[in-house]
Image: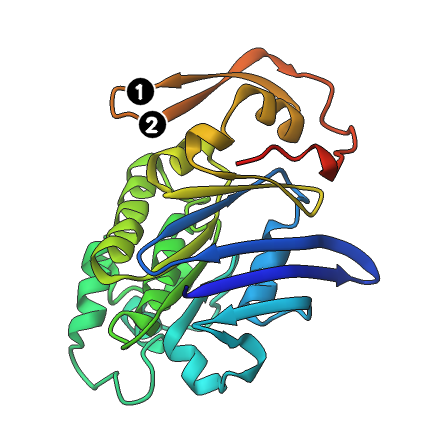
Amino acid sequence: MVLCVNNVQISVERSRIVHGMDCQLAAGELLMLLGPNGAGKSTLLKAISGDLPYIGNVMLSGRELGYWRPERLARQRAVMPQRVDVNFPLTVEEVVQLGRRPGAARRGSDPAVDRLMNELDIAHLKHRLVPGLSGGEQQRLQLARVLAQIIDSPGDRLLLLDECTSALDPAHQQLVLDLVRRLAKEEGVAVLAVVHDLNLAAQFADRLLLMKAGHLVQEGSAWEVLTPDLLETVYGFAARVVELEEGYPMVVPRRSGLSGTYTAPWNPSCRQAS
């Protein structure tokens, strides 16, 4: 396994945010983390990234995260947080080059950088200054920078993405997630992504993890996780789930709105078996 998370507990300002989280991620797998606002998704991702202290074990390629040398870790694990502000007058190409590890970036053209800019539809912006880009353009730029960090590294590679499609239009959401899935399937990158769009998760993920109030509620395929009962329990809205001709489910919220159960406490003992 590329990533093993065992009984991870995370507290922020003396408040327990994540309670005993477990998950595993293999090479070539795209795992998506779902849950309402405040469920602990981003907090968990920050701990796996090494940005928050935790109790428990986070193992990358069989080695505890804290024992990795920073320069080696940077070659194997790349992180895209929810928000990255670049206020310096750098060009798009220069920012993508920032992701290249020492020795990989060269003066002039870099094939890996050119490839990523083309695949993420920002090659035509390569000479534009970053502060003048739209939110969606900046988000695709930051993904290119993050991917440049590990795109040609040897060995296991882990990609952590926190809402990498939140600012994108539908066409670019498809483009980005298609690229991420191809990197997983064709190049063996292990991907853990936090998303809010349930239907994008159903379309692209190999497995889903559903969280509420810092607990794992359910893990499994889209059909096992995106059920009307679980959606009402976790999100507090009524929905029906229909099968598309492509074979994956689509969540259709009912117009009646919130069911009124959103604020009800969730009992971890009620977790459904996978």
Q: Are marks 2 and 1 in contact (CB under 8 Å)?
A: yes
Tag 1 secondary structure? loop
Q: Of all residues shown, which one is farthest toward the front?
A: 273
Residue beneath the point at 20% across and 57% down: 186
Where's residue 238, x and y in %?
59, 16
Dot 1: few (<14), some (14–19), or many (≥20) neighbours within 10 Å? few
Where's residue 183, x and y in %?
26, 57
The quadrant of the picture occupied by the N terminus is bottom left
Where's residue 152, x and y in %?
24, 74
Residue holding disc 1: 244
Total numbered badges shown on the rendered structure: 2
Residue holding disc 2: 248
Q: Of all residues shown, which one is farthest toward the bottom?
A: 103
**Label 2 to label 1: alpha-carbon separation:** 6 Å
* Above or below, 169 relative to 240: below
Tag 2 secondary structure? loop
Q: Of all residues shown, which one is farthest toward the top?
A: 256
Where's residue 113, x and y in %?
23, 70
Dot 2: few (<14), some (14–19), or many (≥20) neighbours within 10 Å? some
Q: Is residue 157 visible?
A: yes
Residue beneath the point at 47% across and 41% down: 208
Residue beneath the point at 38% across and 74% down: 76
In the drawing, does residue 194 fall left or right of residue 234? Answer: left
